[in-house]
Amino acid sequence: MSERAAGLSRRDFMRLGLVAPAALLAACGWDGGPLIEPRLRSISRLNDWVGEKILLSPGRLAPEYPVAARTAQAQFPAYSITRNRTGSFPAPPADWALEVGGLVRAPTRLTREMIEALPRVRYTVKHHCVEGWTAVGTWTGVPVSAVAAMVQPNPEARYLRFDSFDSRYYNGWDLTSAMHPQTILAYAFNDRPLMADHGAPLRLYSPIKLGYKLTKYLTAMTFTRERPGGYWEDQGYPWLGGV
Amino acid sequence: MDAGRPDVKRHHGLVRLTHWLHAIVLLGMIASGLQIYVAFSHFGPRGAPYPNPLDGQPLPAWARLGGWLAGGLNWHFALAWPFVITGLVYLAFLVWSGEWRPLLFRPRDLGPAVQMQLYYLRLRPTHPPQGKHNALQKGAYTFIVLLGALSALTGFAIYKPVQLGWLTRLFGGYELARYWHFWSVWIFVGFTLVHVALVLLVDPASLRAMITGWYRGRFPSHE
């Protein structure tokens, strides 16, 4: 009896020894394939739900830092899809204005002057990139919630979609994060007008989301019923991207 | 030499299941974690890097899982569920069954641990008496549970550094928490290498015990 058990265990051990390295080799650079990858994305949606409904607190503020703690501007990375393709940052159309619409009672078009006349928020906060780096910077802009109050979203509006002129880069947001007091449409970085590298003339900013959720080069802000995807999110990045 | 000595039931099925589940899940956690790491293979704030022997090093593809950053993230955050749940089931079982007693390293194990080390260094001729596990094993198995907890908690600290800010601050902030999270990987790897080497060299019968539950080797339980 114990001999049989010993044989079994030896066979199990052999199987483990053979199967584990084979599975490991097959796994090299493996995103899960057509069978597992969709399941990983489903679990990512579950994690989004946990992140939004359980971990996200609507009023919790990200800590602010003294101006002296800022990351040197040259060390603050600036990404753009257009720049990756062409080598230069995208330029805004001559008649640039922000379209605010969708499921709202009073859609509007806001010029940069109109936006700068709205109530402003200025904070020095830590930026978290999905890659793992952080950087501290000062951002100035109008709270998204203030713009929302102007256009009066309908009750069925559940998401916000932010569009850009950066090679169709876009992001979808949950309303809780969008209405967070530190979520702003920013027009100044480190107390200077926003430049092309960081999303001029207007970008979305918030210290409660990862950098890829912070749409630069904004063109439109649209309230929707259906959940909008996003440039990277559609390719597999976590949709919520909250920190 | 073990003829006539009866097999002893050593590991409950739940312990064996969680042991091997953790081995597989941890492998996936480490490989997907390394995939995430290569997206930015540095530590510390920008302009003030922390020491890192692997700074900027590309890691080989065979050590990574996910193919690209999003793939690595999705594997990592999916496997985190079975990693944490398996760990909690194991701990709950230890508490429920009382099995934590022969495993938990306590101050009174310090002396026996020294004796055990002397034996391994061949400075003591005879194997010190022991219960189910010797004092060094207790130290190792207590340490590995703490390391598991550390890797999970530092993981949550860098997953939600604002919403779980209290946890992130506990580890000295985001950059340090990410640093400890990374080092816990190499301690896991080192532990596993020593663990497997000792099993094979000192007490191969314990490998069978972790698979079938039955032990028939040099160190039968004294219980």
Image (tube, coloured by chain):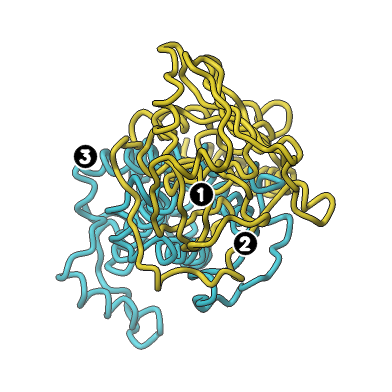
Chain colours: A yellow, B cyan
Residue A72 at x, y percent in the picture: 53, 72
| In the foreground, B158 or A158 | A158
**Secondary structure under badge 1?**
helix
Q: Residue furthest bottom?
A: B123
The residues bearing labels 2 and 1 have C-alpha atoms spaced at a distance of: 33 Å
Determine the residue positioned at 36% across, 49% down. Answer: B162
Q: Where is the N terminus of chain B found, in terms of image quarters? A: bottom left
In the image, is B135 to the left or to the right of B48? left
Kindly identify which residue carries mark 3: B97
Q: Are marks 2 and 3 on the same chain?
A: no
| In the foreground, A158 or A128 | A158
Q: Is residue B4 above or below residue B92?
A: below
Residue A93 at x, y percent in the picture: 74, 40
Earlier in the chain: of badge 1 and badge 3, it is 1
Kindly identify which residue carries mark 1: B26
Name the quadrant containing residue A145: top left
Disc 2 vs disc 1: which is toward the camera? Answer: 2
Q: Is residue A133 above or below residue A202?
A: below
Give the chain of mark 1: B
Kindly check if marks 1 and 3 are in contact, taking CB atoms under 8 A apart as contact.
Answer: no
On the question of residue B98 being in view, the answer is: yes
**Secondary structure under badge 2?**
loop
The residues bearing labels 2 and 3 have C-alpha atoms spaced at a distance of: 53 Å
Determine the residue positioned at 75% across, 48% down. Answer: A90
Amino acid bearing label 3: Ser
Amino acid bearing label 1: Leu
Q: Categorize mark 3 by other alpha carbons within 10 Å: few (<14), some (14-19), many (20+).
A: few
Kindly identify which residue carries mark 2: A77
